[in-house]
């Protein structure tokens, strides 16, 4: 019984952490009635995580496509090259994003470290 209780607690903790990956907040309220129920719930949550990951990847791909089009327009507008276009765009960003490449990425849906690639 004690081993099962420990396994149940571990599964509940895993559920709480995975829930955060899907919904952005830990499910501290989650309690399963049994190990079997916790496993079923985790299976369902894992499918939600797969779907959320696909959605995020699609959104990032779209953000990259749109951003690269903006960079190309800046080059055509007179920046001349990619580095100058990036400098123009990032230095012209509003508020705290001005000059902060990583925050700029965050605000524009680009992957972390996008400019380091």
Image (spheres, grey):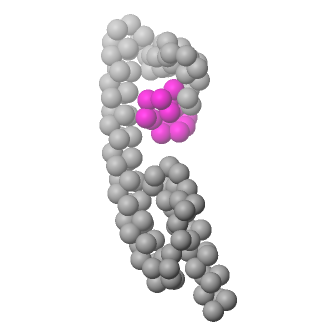
Q: Which residue is drawn at 59% across and 68% down?
A: 13
Q: Is residue 57 left or right of residue 12?
A: left
Residue 46 percent coordinates (x, y): 42, 66
Q: Residue at x 60, y 87 (%)?
A: 4
Residue 46, placed above or below residue 115: below
Q: Residue at x 56, y 68 (%)?
A: 14
Span shown in magenta: 104-117
Give the farthest residue toward the top.
78
Residue 86 percent coordinates (x, y): 48, 20
Let me know if residue 17 appears in the view.
no
Q: Is residue 11 magenta?
A: no
Residue 69 percent coordinates (x, y): 32, 24
Q: Nearer the viewer, residue 79 or 47?
A: 47
Residue 29, placed above or below residue 94: below
Q: Which of 1 and 64 is in front in this view?
A: 1
Q: Which residue is drawn at 34% across and 8% down?
A: 77
Residue 106, placed above or below residue 71: below
Residue 22 percent coordinates (x, y): 45, 55
Q: Is residue 90 left or right of residue 66?
A: right
Let me know if residue 48 appears in the view.
yes
């Amino acid at each position: 019984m004690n081993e099962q209780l420990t396994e149940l607690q571990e599964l509940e903790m895993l559920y709480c952490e995975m829930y955060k990956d899907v919904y952005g907040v830990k499910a501290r309220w989650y309690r399963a009635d049994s190990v079997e129920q916790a496993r079923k719930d985790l299976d369902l949550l894992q499918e939600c995580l797969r779907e959320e990951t696909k959605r995020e990847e699609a959104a990032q791909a779209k953000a990259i496509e749109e951003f690269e089009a903006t960079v190309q327009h800046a080059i055509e507008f007179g920046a001349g090259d990619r580095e100058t276009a990036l400098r123009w765009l990032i230095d012209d960003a509003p508020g705290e994003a001005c000059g902060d490449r990583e925050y700029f990425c965050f605000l524009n849906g680009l992957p972390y470290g996008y400019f380091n690639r």
